[in-house]
Image (cartoon, rainbow, N blue to C red):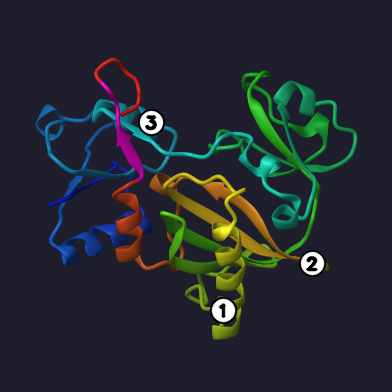
Amino acid sequence: MPTLILTPRFTEDAQALWRAAGLLGWSVERLSSWRVPDDLLSIPDPVLYLEGLFGPTLADQFGLRLLEPAVDWLPSLPEEYRKRRVSLTTLRAARQLSEPAFVKPPNDKSFPARVYLGTELPEGYDEGSPVLVSEVVVWEKEFRCFVLDRQLRTMSVYLRGGELQRESQFAATDAELAEAGAFVKTVLEDQRVELCRTAVLDIGVIADRGWAVVEQNAAWGSGLYGCDPIQVLEVLRYAAVPLRPDGGFA
């Protein structure tokens, strides 16, 4: 039986997964620090939900590598699914931007993702670190999709007009869910779109352009919003792969 491993941080998402794991008969262990106790290192089927930048370090202690998209995944996505200009560059190069652009780290939250001028980008980070630079667009609504083996497992609206939908309990109409489901199905069936076995696709509607992919996230650290936590757990079961004894990937 799997064991859900949670970090020391108490969050709504972690609590939802804890309750769902209990319904499934899983064991649950919450780490008390950022070092994994020796008695947990030998559990047979750890399932990791690791919010924050410490995720890869914790996974490594279990002998696991977390699945995450390539840093150039979004700019490499076919334009028909992206519907905006996106490029991969370095923080140093992005400082030369003379027009506003949406700038973010590809796979982590090391600095806030938002619209910047080049001169407004934060200091104190590795100037050679990769960043994604995107054309500024208006997203009317955005949906989170947990995916396993290119199949949608659970989906939730999370933003409307840039506003988090927590107060509405992430409610969406049947028509909206059908439209979002049809679009993500098209993306998932297109073999040009490279995906990890587990993925979180954020999709949405760009004003005057239609449905598009916002980004791909790693499943092991993504927020749930209104997604079904039991389905999320099924995705998380496959969100890490064993390391070989030599440090390579199994």
> Could you say whether the residue bearing mark 1 is in a helix, strand or loop?
helix
Residue tagged 2? 207
> Could you say whether the residue bearing mark 2 is in a helix, strand or loop?
loop
Query: Callout 2, which amino acid?
Result: Ala
The Cα atoms of the two marked residues, 3 and 1, are separated by: 35 Å
The Cα atoms of the two marked residues, 1 and 2, are separated by: 19 Å
Check if mark 3's residue and mark 1's residue have beta carbons within 8 Å.
Answer: no
**Where the C terminus falls, by quadrant?**
top left
Mark 1 Cα shell of 10 Å, populated few (<14), some (14-19), many (≥20): few
Residue shown at the point (65%, 64%) measured from the top left: 204
**189 to the left or right of 234:** right
Residue shown at the point (65%, 54%) measured from the top left: 214
Q: Which residues are magenta?
A: 239-244
Q: Residue furthest left?
A: 39
> Would you say residue 34 sits in the magenta stretch?
no
Label whose residue precedes the other's in the sequence (1 or 2): 1
Q: Residue furthest bottom?
A: 174
Residue 191: horizontal and vertical position, in percent?
57, 51
The quarter holding residue 177 reads bottom right
> Could you say whether the residue bearing mark 3 is in a helix, strand or loop?
helix
Residue tagged 1? 178
Residue 180: horizontal and vertical position, in percent?
59, 71
Q: Which mark is residue 90?
A: none
| For residue 160, above or below residue 33 | below
Residue shown at the point (52%, 39%) measured from the top left: 69
Label whose residue precedes the other's in the sequence (2 or 3): 3
Residue tagged 3? 56
The quarter holding residue 182 reads bottom right
Q: Nearer the viewer, residue 89 or 123?
A: 89
